[in-house]
Amino acid sequence: MASSIRGRAVRLLDNFINQTLVLSTRNISRSLSENSIRGDYQGCQSSVLLTSETRGRARSSYRRLSSAGRALRQVQEPGRQASPLSPAHRVSLIDTDLRHMFDDIKKELESQFELQEIAKYYFDGQGKAVRPLITVLMSRAINTHLHDEDRLFNTQWQVAKVTEMLHTASLVHDDVLDASDTRRGKPSVNNLYGQRKAVMAGDYILSVASTMLARIRNEEVIVVLSQVLSDLVQGEFMQLGSKENENERFAHYLKKTFKKTASLIAYSCKAVAILSGADDSLQEVAFQYGRNVGIAFQLVDDLLDFVSSSSTMGKPTAADLKLGLATAPVLFACEKFPELNPMIMRRFQEPGDVQKAFELVHKSDGLEQTQFLARQHCQEAIKVISTLKPSEEQKALITITDKVLNRIK
Ligand code: GRG
């Protein structure tokens, strides 16, 4: 098992990593205060800043993303699941190693008939499995750094599985809360089995994952991954409210983004570092890599909601606006179109709000700015992970930042 996972990690290496963007240090972030972008959300010590002279470059890199997305959309069959990786790398991900992971998880979920059927529904190899992939790569990168061997410890493999299970449980609950009919291009669990059974299936996945976590028998790791559960719920809760004060809105959004999405990746990276015997500063390297990649991942997710087709995403587009959510593209667009502010406060509830907001976002540079901010977080992730001893897995973790930025679903 361990050697086949390493094989996949090595196959993930990309020949082309487009990391040539040079960041300017001059901060003229217009109506967004510096603190709203920097240093104001959990665990953030990075110097992620938006500057006007980098906007031009952001715009052209965003255009590249859009045209690549369009080209790929044309060749994809509706409903078919694509990997976040380029076609050349897509092969190995689902077909080999991770199939073991899904089988392992499904074995853990065995139970009374219908409950297990519902709980296993999403462990079909159709998700991108980005979180366990990063967790395994981080494990090996840190093991190489500390022990000069990239063998994956069994406890780290357990964390990778728990990570995917926490993610999946949160998706099941999220779809109930949002009354989503589809997920990954197929009917959602709540659509197929009803809300009550979906909630219980999510709870069940969570409880089995908790047992697996306890079996690792490492108190620190249990504490770290329990924090994720608390963050997921708090992040979801924060999403229910918007800040009246425009200056506070972006900080609120970034804090929510950390809790809802980045926390799981960041603390999973930290957990496997702990299991490798890492000291505090090395644990911080792992955490900061995960935090930055996680925030970039959500920023791109928010951007794709405006630019990707529903067949590619496997769920309706502009879904966030329809749910009343003002994500980064809208918040940035407010700078040019202040008429978005009242729409944000009423959560796009009035007739025509969703359509109008969608158009204004496309007329503004909100999408470019969102992509640019994601790119800056990826640069931070590369900076921290580059402090480790060189290894194939370290290179793959750098490559993943590029995949996160340029993914189309
Ligand atoms: C039950 C643990 C638990 C939490 C309840 C509902 C909730 C609180 C939290 C929601 C968290 C959530 C769904 C965050 C969304 C993060 C996100 C970007 C999901 C999409 O991830 P992908 O694109 O999905 O990696 P795939 O389908 O590839 O697995």
Image (cartoon, rainbow, N blue to C red):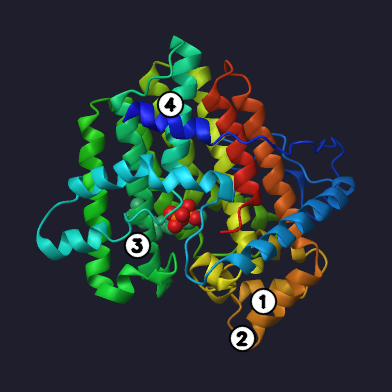
Quick one: which residue is furthest to the top in this view?
147
The residue that disc 2 covers is: 350
- Would you call the spot at circle 1 few (<14 residues within 10 Å), some (14-19), or many (20 or more)? some
Q: Are marks 1 and 2 in contact (CB under 8 Å)?
A: yes
Residue 196 position in % (x across, y down): 23, 71
Viewer-closest of 364 and 114: 114
Q: Amino acid at mark 2?
A: Glu
**Image position of 312 (left or right of 183):** right
Residue that appears at 65% across and 39% down: 378
Give the spatial CA distance, label 4 vs label 2.
Answer: 49 Å
Q: Disc 3 on helix, strand or loop? A: helix
Residue 139's mark? 4
Q: Are marks 1 and 4 in contact (CB under 8 Å)?
A: no
**Residue 14 seen anywhere in this rendered image of the structure:** yes
**Image position of 310 (left or right of 17):** left
Which quadrant does the C terminus fall into?
bottom right
Residue 343's mark? 1
**Sequence order check, earlier mark of 1 and 2:** 1
Q: Disc 4 on helix, strand or loop? A: helix
Viewer-closest of 188 and 407: 407
**Sequence order check, earlier mark of 4 and 2:** 4
Which quadrant does the N terminus fall into?
top left
Q: Amino acid at mark 3?
A: His
Q: Are marks 2 and 3 in contact (CB under 8 Å)?
A: no
Quick one: which residue is furthest to the bottom in this view?
351
